[in-house]
Image (cartoon, helix red, strand yellow):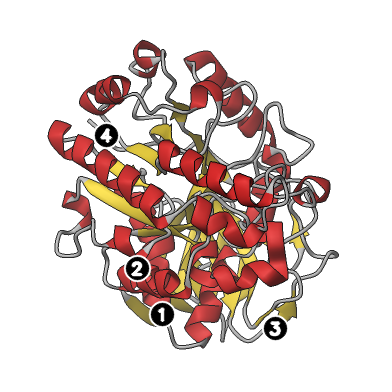
Amino acid sequence: MNTTLILNANIVNQGQVFQGDVLIRGQYIDRVGKDLSAVPADRVMDVKGKYLLPGVIDDQVHFREPGLTHKATIYTEARAGVAGGVTSFMEMPNTNPPTFTQALLEDKYQIASCTSLANYSFFIGASNDNLDEVMKTDIGRVCGLKIFMGSSTGNLLVDDPAILEGFFSRFPAVIAAHCEDEPTIRKNMALFREKYGEDVPVECHPLIRSDEACYLSSSFAIGLAKKHHARFHVLHISTGRETHLFDSDIPLEKKMITSEACVHHLWFNDTDYQRLGNFIKWNPAIKTAADQDQVFKALLDDRIDVIATDHAPHTLDEKKNTYFKAPSGGPLIQHSLVALLEFYHQGKIGLEKIVQKMCHNPAILFNISKRGYIREGYFADLAVVDLDRAWTVDNNNILSKCGWSPFSGVTFRSAVTHTFVSGHLAYADGKFDETKQGERLLFDRK
């Protein structure tokens, strides 16, 4: 087996930062120790002064393949993620066709097995008539079930209480949901359309997709989950009000109801719409500075369990449309870790907490097998970070296929220098080694 010896790393793992060495043998971490310099290895990397983190696990991305590959592909977006220290992703079912069947689900896995530089998993999608198909899911090989309880069209939107009862009462693994109340959104949309016609200012987005719309849907879904003792995960919390729906005094391993914060809701607020317009149009909407602060506080006190991106690229031309025609979402996966490290530089969050929320907790929450930690016997999913290598985001270094970023022009003080994916050095100082693809994530579930 190929071996790599990483020396003199500042290792961030399980609530500690300590200097040590890591020996990788094949796909796995073979040894973690204080002085392994005498151990023979095929490759030796001295990373003195740099930090070694478990690879980031992003539990919510939209990579657009199949059917929407003019925006992105599994290949392009996984590659962008690896450059940003993301070693594993979980991708959503709103592709074309939507991932409503086991056959369509396996089609995605087949594409990823040939093209994804990162490790991968895909959600099966809920529709108004596919409960029996969903129940065929192998929960040891699939991350979970995704339900769009808002912000969708056609058969992707599931808001009939009777149909939702079926999913919540029967699905045996993680149910993840996008929660926004559609009747509230439609009512608000009609009011703003009456006032502005088709030229609604994007600044109205958080008023249309309002605090009330989020809270009504999230609280309803949590009630359903509690009624049926379902394992439920609320995606992309965007309001301070919603943060009070979650507990901080229960260990994550025992939580039945969990939640996620996304990078854009931590970084931006509604004062940024005037400057960035549709480039920060997401669903749920980026809201007030008070909401931003409360979401961050809930992240720190463990009411919110994980950090993800909701990476959802669209083309520049699509984003330049008027409000109603411009799609929601944007590319973030390349910059998620360095954005959180910028918060570290600002004194807002510790390195240990970043690793907990981006690496350890997704692994716990989804019961991912042997990933998310720097541990002997675990897969060698690792990111080497230089906290003092400043760089500026511009069109020449954006790797997502869409070619733009809401972070364009931002200077980050930290950089990811190396990324190992299942033991393979997939990224090193700006260069990729694509001779080996990532692995399908497996899940320790009974």
Q: Is residue 303 above or below residue 217?
A: below
Q: Is residue 19 above or below residue 84?
A: below
Label 1: which residue?
A: 349
Label 4: which residue?
A: 445
Relative to residue 149, is residue 73 drawn left or right? right
Please give the name of the residue rendered at 24% of the width and 24% of the height, measured from the top-left corner: 165
Q: Where is residue 341 in the image (x, y as percent from the top left)?
A: 53, 77
Label 2: which residue?
A: 299
Q: Is mark 1 on a helix, strand or loop?
A: loop
CB atoms at circles 1 and 3 under 8 Å apart? no
Relative to residue 8, is residue 378 drawn left or right? left
Q: Position of residue 340 (x, y in %)?
A: 51, 72
Is residue 428 in view? Answer: no
Please give the name of the residue rendered at 50% of the width and 58% of the height, measured from the top-left corner: 56
Which one is closest to the eye, mark 1 or mark 3?
1
Give neighbour class at mark 1: few <14, some 14-19, many 20+ (Cα, 10 Å): some
Quadrant of res 295? bottom left
Label 3: which residue?
A: 390
CB atoms at circles 4 and 1 under 8 Å apart? no
Which residue type carries mark 2? Leu
Which residue type carries mark 1? Ile
CB atoms at circles 1 and 2 under 8 Å apart? yes
Quadrant of res 335? bottom right
